[in-house]
Image (tube, helix red, strand yellow):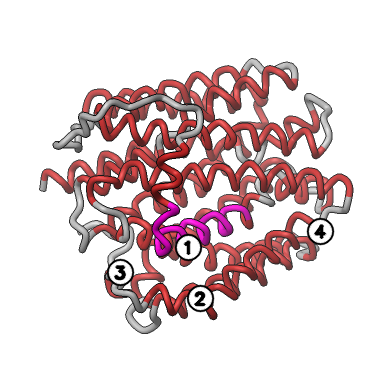
Amino acid sequence: MKNKSALSLIFLTVFIDLLGFGILIPILPTFATKILHVDETAIGIAIAIYSLVQFFFNPLFGKLSDKYGRKPLIVVSLLLNAAGYLIFAFTSSFLVLLISRVVGGIGGSSIGVAQAYIADVTTRENRSKGMGLIGAAFGLGFVFGPMIGGMLSKYGYMVTGFASGGFSFIAFILTLILLPESLKNKNKEVIKRKLIDVKSFVKVFQKPKLAILVLLFFILTFSVANIYGTFALLGYKIYGFTDMQNGYMFGIMGLVGALVQGGLIHVISKYINDRRLIIISSFLMIIGLASLPYGETFLGLALIVIVLSIGTGILQPILLSMISKVSSESEQGVTLSINQSMSAFARVLGPLWGGFAFEYFGYPFPFLTGAFSTLIIFLIAIFYLPKILNRGDGNNVHELNNVIKIN
């Protein structure tokens, strides 16, 4: 019961924080275009710098949490998140926007710590269920956050910044007062604070099974990151959508993702093994990403988004669960944080390329790039994954049956 309460609290904390993050998603590119008058490449830089900061801080926060505990890192991160959103509320230049993204990026470097928290309070048998909470929090944050952001943008972009900061501050208070510490046996080794913890990266990538799974997660993240800034620009510049319509589109994306991770994957994993699920989900992503520039109408684009979201909703929790299960119990924090750091690096490259390609090669290119990248996952799943899955990692598809659902 105690672990159930801890899981519920960490889910609530991450959800509220990501709700604030979701508010800015549909309006940041249009804000930069309308108010700051910057081009698509600059928008890509503003989005990428957030993830670049996370690339450096995710492993550090993971190691610090292995030594000092999960709660202190989560608490500090939430407070920094709130500060970043408040800076955004007063943004009047591109430089201030970048500063807000840097502060927010440091604050957003605790997802790996939250995953380690879940690993602390779950058994290996229930790990998939616990890890699914992060996916559910992301999904629900992407359902309600963008819709709230789209509606609030009618009252001014400053209001959206205050709302985002307010949600993160609420999560900070809840965590500070209610969330118990999960780490019982802290790592007493001295931690040398390095900008890039090469030793930890090497340790993870020396393990072939873990390395290929982290690589697949990296490619998945890069494929989707290509559209982080360009999807809202596609709606605004090509389809003529308002901020509210963009918010609804992101909301549809989040809702479908949450439904898939909360229910559909539970059903289909009983009948389809891991390898086939990865093949099917990556194929759906290829179709969805390649079709986004050609949706033509709100309804057409919404249908394409549904296909894409089903693919990502299946693929993300499977890979994340497998990464956790091939990691030792004592290295959950650093392993999951390394994975998040690699994901952050993918979220650096994706928006940079996406913004550049949108501006100089044409609006379809970021989406076609994402489709081509996902094709790599599709091919690896067909020709290489069987070798990984047949080596006794314990990646039983039936362990995914309880993804997200809490008894």
The residue labelled by disc 4 is: 364
Q: Residue at x 78, y 61 (%)?
A: 293
Look at label 1 and name its amino acid: Ile
Helix, strand or loop at mark 1 = helix
Distance between the Cα atoms at labels 1 and 3?
13 Å
First in sequence, mark 1 or 3: give its number.
1
First in sequence, mark 3 or 2: give its number.
2
The residue labelled by disc 2 is: 384
Q: Residue at x 43, y 77 (%)?
A: 387
Q: Magenta segment: does it hold 255? A: no
Residue 327 is situated, as x and y percent measured from the top left of the image, at 31, 55
Distance between the Cα atoms at labels 4 and 1?
29 Å
**In front of the other: label 2 or label 4?**
2
Q: Which mark is residue 393?
A: 3
The residue labelled by disc 1 is: 212
Residue 69 is situated, as x and y percent measured from the top left of the image, at 24, 30
